[in-house]
């Protein structure tokens, strides 16, 4: 009989402070608590790393306490602690790692360092029991890549963005159009009143083979279209702002849809058979993008929205899978801003002394 395990997870890699308890039996997610910093950073038009780090340090203890209470367990009932040890904003990652170290030392239980991207990539196994292998489209504010997930510790990158991540592009478009942050929800809501065909925007890299993507040029095209509207109309009418949002969102969805088709074909070549498609990351919460991806695969898995954005349940689950597989490498407990999942493929973004971003 499999021993019942309870894992406490901590996540603090960006602007969400989170803690959760998961189990390998019954209702897997026993609790999931997320304290968002959206209001703290609202006046700055984006996440300020120093402010985020301080907020994490202030909230982590309360978050852990709330997660334990929601799960109706005590810290002494926890079998191991999993914590995001990268990649992410280093101040926030350090806050989480140090808190987890203290808790694990006090209870004399194992501590597991988890790659934030692995947390996202393994989420469909927590929510949908998705077996290996499968193709994961990880699409968020800081990342966008296709990962062939073949085991708890085996990820092969098939392609990704060569510049901006889609979530980053959504945030920048929101700022260009004087919409609130976070930009993703604001652009999506505004786009509902717009015409996705009103403004012609490029679909970058669709004329090139492969699964790589680019969103920086698309952002520049929106900027030029906005400036042209302002010059013609003496301002940016509400209707045309909606058209810009709808046209931009449609362009992103078209790029992701076509590139996902190619990634699925590439995954089938590697594995010798068709694999399911899963999606995770904050941008996966976008309804139009989900709808477009659902048309690409007959076996499409999209976890609940609360597990697509940053959360600690995915970190606890990834830690649980690593713990059961005996993957508790002490080196993974080093807080790091960069930590590619695929250690073999050439870096797509960043290199040199700081290492690759992706």
Image: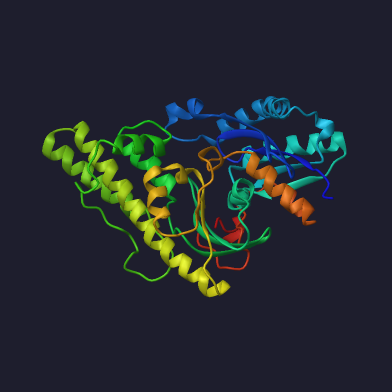
Q: Position of residue 224 (x, y in %)?
A: 23, 47
Identify whether 238 is placed above or below 303: above
Along the line of sight, which residue is nearer the eye, 345 or 7?
7
Q: Residue at x 56, y 39 (%)?
A: 14
Q: Residue furthest right?
A: 108
Q: Residue at x 57, y 34 (%)?
A: 16
Along the line of sight, which residue is nearer the eye, 195 or 157?
195
Along the line of sight, which residue is nearer the eye, 165 or 33?
33
Q: Image quadrant of residue 237?
A: top left
Q: Image quadrant of residue 63?
A: top right
Q: Name the colour scheme.
A: rainbow
Q: Residue at x 65, y 26 (%)?
A: 59
The image shows a total of numbered marks equal to 0
Report whether residue 313 is seen: yes
Identify whether 102 is placed above or below 113: above
Q: Position of residue 328 (x, y in %)?
A: 78, 53
Report whether residue 143 is seen: no
Tell me if 122 is positioned left or right of 3 in this view. left
Q: Position of residue 53 (x, y in %)?
A: 61, 33
């Amino acid at each position: 009989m499999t021993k019942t395990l309870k894992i406490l997870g901590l996540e603090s890699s960006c602007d969400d402070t989170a803690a959760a308890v998961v189990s390998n039996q019954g209702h897997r997610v026993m609790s999931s608590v997320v304290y968002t910093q959206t209001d703290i950073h609202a006046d700055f038009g984006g996440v300020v790393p120093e402010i985020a780090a301080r907020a994490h340090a202030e909230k982590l203890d309360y978050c852990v306490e709330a997660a334990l209470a929601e799960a109706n367990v005590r810290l002494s009932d926890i079998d191991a602690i999993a914590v995001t040890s990268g990649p992410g904003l280093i101040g926030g990652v350090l806050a989480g790692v140090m808190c987890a170290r203290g808790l694990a030392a006090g209870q004399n239980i194992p501590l597991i360092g988890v790659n934030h991207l692995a947390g996202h990539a393994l989420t469909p196994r927590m929510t949908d029991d998705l077996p290996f292998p499968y193709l994961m489209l990880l699409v968020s504010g800081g990342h966008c890549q296709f990962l062939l997930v073949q085991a708890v510790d085996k990820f092969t990158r098939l392609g990704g963005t060569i510049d901006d991540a889609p979530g980053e592009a959504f945030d920048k478009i929101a700022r260009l159009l004087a919409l609130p942050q976070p930009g993703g929800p604001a652009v999506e809501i505004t786009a509902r009143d717009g015409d996705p065909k009103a403004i012609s925007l490029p679909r970058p890299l669709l004329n090139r083979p492969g699964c790589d993507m680019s969103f920086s040029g698309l952002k520049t095209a929106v900027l030029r279209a906005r400036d042209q509207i302002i010059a013609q109309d003496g301002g940016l009418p509400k209707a045309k702002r909606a058209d810009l949002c709808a046209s931009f969102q449609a362009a992103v969805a078209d790029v992701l849809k076509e590139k996902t088709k190619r990634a699925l074909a590439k995954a089938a070549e590697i594995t010798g058979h068709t694999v399911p498609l899963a999606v995770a990351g904050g941008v996966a919460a976008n309804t139009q993008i989900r709808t477009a991806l659902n048309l690409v695969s007959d076996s499409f898995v999209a976890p609940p929205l609360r597990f697509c954005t940053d959360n600690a349940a995915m970190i606890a689950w990834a830690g649980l899978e690593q713990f059961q597989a005996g993957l508790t490498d002490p080196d993974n407990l080093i807080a790091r801003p960069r930590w590619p999942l695929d250690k073999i493929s050439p870096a797509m973004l960043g290199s040199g002394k700081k290492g690759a971003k992706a």
